[in-house]
Amino acid sequence: MTLPSYAMNQASFPEMYERWLVGPLFRPWAEMALDELELSSGDRVLDIACGTGIVARVARERLGGAGFIVGVDVSADMLAVARAVEPAVDWRQGNAGELPLPSGETFDVVVCQQGLQFFPDKPAAAAQMRHALTKGGRLAIATWRPDDEIPFFRDLRRVAERHLGAIADQRYSFGEAAPLEALLRDAGFHEVRSRIVSRTIHFGEGVPFLHLNTMALVGMSSLAKELGDHERKRVVEAIVSESASVLQPYTIGSGLAFELSTNLATAKG
Ligand SMILES: C[S@@+](CC[C@H](N)C(=O)[O-])C[C@H]1O[C@@H](n2cnc3c(N)ncnc32)[C@H](O)[C@@H]1O
């Protein structure tokens, strides 16, 4: 199975992602994207790179049985969690560059939240999105802004880089609006627009978040491939410990609050 290079292939990562990250970090933007798309009864919705399924689940909450919702992800482990949490969605394993859709299957709404930056062939993925969308259908894509604009994540990366050398953090690797808009125009979408949206993210528990973020950073470093399990664990612990000073200004009790920004691109089929 092809997986993004940030530790999604660790057996427990999808459960931890769902347990600790989805509520504070992904649900608010899923709600915002679906607000923007103005779902209406009967809509057919496709969630690409659905992960553990938050966009599809929010769509399901809004449409109930009066909609048809498909979630696609390359990771069987992420989909296993998605399926366990919400069996009513049609979860399918597949690659965004070659969507697992039978010939002629189309959707009124296509969403890709924080997935596009991981796709190796973005034009192929955009073409597949275009193909999957009905004429006049609505598309929304979110990609985080570059982490150089997000001091909290930039400074946590810098701590990790002291141990691991330069880290190309894939999560923030497609952060400029212009290439995102160009990708969609080149794929033939209409009414392509994008805006930057920022909000304050609140974590009730800072410690699990820091561990997960550190595991992700270690997983993305080129040095990580050379580390055995024991050494990797030691490096994660050292980075977590040294990150305390970065976290300090963002700490509220046992929780955290920090600013985060995303591009939100919308278009029509
Ligand atoms: C940061 S997660 C976002 C998940 C979800 N959209 C959310 O908002 O929580 C990125 C997801 O992209 C998926 N992914 C990466 N490359 C992919 C590809 N080529 N095709 C489909 N999914 C992919 C990963 O497996 C992962 O679940």
Image: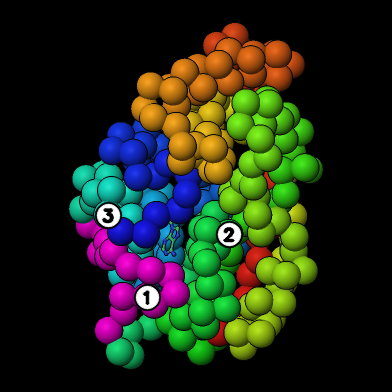
The residue at which mark 2 appears reads as 117
- Judge the density around disc 2: few (<14), some (14-19), many (≥20) Cα neighbours within 10 Å: many
Q: Quadrant of ligand 1?
A: bottom left
x and y percentages locating residue 101 in the rendered image: 31, 79
- The quadrant in which residue 230 appears is top left
The magenta stretch is 88-102
The residue at which mark 1 appears reads as 99
Tell me, yes or no, if residue 101 can be seen here: yes
Whole-Å distance between the Cαs marked 3 and 1?
15 Å
| Cβ atoms under marks 3 and 2 closer than 8 Å | no
Query: Callout 2, which amino acid?
Result: Gln
- Label 2 CB less than 8 angstroms from ligand 1: no
- Vertical comparison of 207 with 267: above or below: above
- Judge the density around disc 3: few (<14), some (14-19), many (≥20) Cα neighbours within 10 Å: many
Q: Residue at x 44, y 32 (%)?
A: 227
- Vertical comparison of 268 with 49: above or below: below
Q: Residue at x 39, y 77 (%)?
A: 98
Query: Callout 1, which amino acid?
Result: Leu
The residue at which mark 3 appears reads as 76
x and y percentages locating residue 17 in the rendered image: 40, 37
Q: Residue at x 47, y 18 (%)?
A: 234
Foreground residue, 57 or 3?
Answer: 3
Residue 101 forms part of the magenta stretch: yes
User: In the structure shown, which secondary structural element does the residue marked by tag 1 occupy?
Assistant: loop
Point out the tag, 3 or 2, that comes first from the N-terminus.
3
- The quadrant in which residue 190 appears is bottom right
- Magenta span: predominant SS is loop
